[in-house]
Amino acid sequence: MAEFDVDLFVIGGGSGGVRAARIAAGHGARVMIAEEYRMGGTCVIRGCVPKKLFVIGSHVRHEIEDAAGFGWTIPSVSFDWATLIANKDKEIARLEAAYTTNVEKSGAQIVKSRAVIEDKHTVRLLADDKKITAKYILIATGGAPNHGAAIPGIEHVISSNEAFHLKKLPKRIVIQGGGYIALEFAGIFAGFGSDVTVIYRGDNILRGFDEDVRAHVRSEMEKQGITILTGCTVAKVDRHGDEFTTHLSNGSSVASDQVMFAIGRHPNVASLGLENAGVAINPKNGGIAVDHFSKSSVDSIYAIGDVTHRFNLTPVAIREGHAFADTVFGKREVQVDHANIPTAVFSQPEVGTVGLTETEARAQFSHVDIYKTTFRPIKATMSGRDTRVLMKLVVDGSTDRVLGCHIVGDCAAEVTQVVAIAVKMKATKADFDATIALHPTAAEELVTMRTPTARHVRQAAE
C-alpha cells in the first residue's frame, strides 16, 4: 500500500501548475491538481490571452483610420462590444477545454475544488471535505488584483477581472495605475472609442522601465488623446446612478462611466493554510519564500509563479513548473535562470524590452555606450499618422556586450523575443553590426546603428 494517496498535489490550475502537473506525470508521478475556478488560471481566463485579443480588436480602429493613405475608401463602420465579449468568451472556453484535456491526457487527475493545506503532506478539498495525502505539495495559486488602501467608494471600483465582462463599453473611464495592466487597458478602451484618463502616483508611467521608454510611451499615448495625470492618486469615488466622480489627491475630479484600478497584484496566499505546515512568507514581497529550486521553508512543499512574487510573468511560471517537476521527479536538478527575461507591454504603442535599462547599466558598469534612434515608421509616411518608433541598445563599453534592448512601436514584442536570444547568448555590438540588415524593416535599425548617441564613463574614486 502506498504511503501517500498521490506523489504530487498541485494547488492551482494555471499555466505554471498545469505545466508542473503534466511534466511530473510524464516522469511517472501520481498527480492530482485542484482548481477552484477555471483551468488555465489568470493568464488564459482573465489575463494575457483575453487582453491580447482585446488589444488586437481595439487596434483595428487604427488600421481603418490609416487605410485612406493607401487608397482605400472605407464606409462608415460600427463596433459592437457584445460581439467582442461573446467571441472572446468562446475562445477562452476553447482554451480552457484544451488545458483540461492536456492535463488529463498526461495522466494527472483534476479536482474542481479549493484546496487548503492541513499539514506538510495533507490537503483538504473544501468541495467535499475530503483529505488527500501527498509526498509533495506544489502551490501555484498565482496573484490577485490589489486595490490598495481602502478609500471612500472603493466598492464602485473594478479590476481587470471585471473589465473582461462589462455589459457595455464605457464612454468614459478612469484607470488608476501606471504599469502593464493599466496602460494596456488604457489603449484598449481608447481604441474602442472610450475617453480615457490615467491616474498614476509617480512622476511618470512604467516605473522600472528605461527612462526613454517611459517618456516615449507617454508622449505617444497622449497623442492618441489619452489623458495621463501623474503625481496624484484617487482619494474618493462617488456614484451618481450610472456615473461616477473620481476625486483626486490634488483636489481635482474626473467624471466617468467606469472606474478601474490596476495598481498591482499581490500573491494569492490568503486562506491556503500555510501556517498549518509552517510555510514561510517572504517579508520583502509578501510571497511564499522559496529557494533556487522553488522549495519553500518546508521540504515537502514547493511554490512557483506569481504566488512567490519573484518575476510575475506567465512564461516564468511555466519554466519554474517544468524545472520543479524535472528536479523532484525527473532525477535531475534544474534551476531557472531569471536573468535577462524578455517582457512586453501591449500598450499602444507596444513595448518590448530585455536586459538592463540605461540607469541599471550605469550603476553596474564603469563604461556604458548608448545607441538610440527614433524614426517615423514606413507605414506612417503614407497613412499620415503622427507616431514614431523608439529603438535603444545599452552596451558595455569595455567588453562591447549588449546589455539591454528597448523597443517601442508596432511588433516590438515580436522583435524583442528574437533579440532576447542574442542578449542571452551575450552577443556583442560587433555581432549586431556584422549582421546584414533585413530591408525594409523597422528592426534593421538594431543592426545599422553605428555611432553611440551617448557615452557614460564613471570616474574611478581617488
Image (cartoon, rainbow, N blue to C red):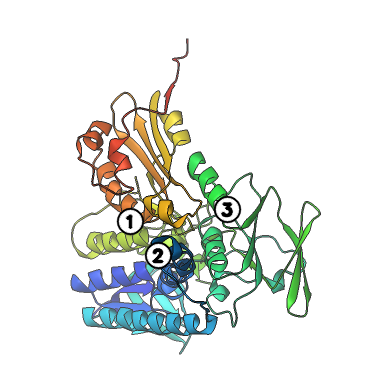
Amino acid under disc 2: Gly
Left or right of 361 in this view: 281: right
> Which disc number belongs to residue 71?
2
| Residue 178 spot, x, y in % from top left | 58, 54
Whether residue 29 can be seen here = yes
> Which disc number belongs to residue 223?
3
Residue drawn at x 56%, y 73% is 163
Question: Mark 3 packing: few (<14 Cα in 10 Å), some, or many (20+)?
Answer: few
CA gap, disc 1 and disc 3: 24 Å
Mark 3 lies on a secondary structure that is helix
Relative to the observer, which residue lies in front, 171 or 299? 171
Whether residue 290 can be seen here = no
Q: Is residue 387 above or below residue 170?
A: above
Residue drawn at x 34%, y 29% is 396
Which of the two discs, 3 and 2, labels the residue nearer the N terminus?
2
| Residue 431 spot, x, y in % from top left | 22, 35
Which residue bears the numbered disc 1?
414
Q: Nearer the viewer, mark 1 or mark 3?
A: 3
Q: Nearer the viewer, mark 1 or mark 2?
A: 2
Which of the two discs, 1 and 2, labels the residue nearer the N terminus?
2
Amino acid under disc 1: Glu
Mark 1 lies on a secondary structure that is helix
Q: In this view, does 361 lie above or below 164?
A: above
| Residue 287 spot, x, y in % from top left | 49, 58
Check the image and name the residue furthest to the right. 251
Residue drawn at x 20%, y 35% is 434
Question: Mark 2 packing: few (<14 Cα in 10 Å), some, or many (20+)?
Answer: few
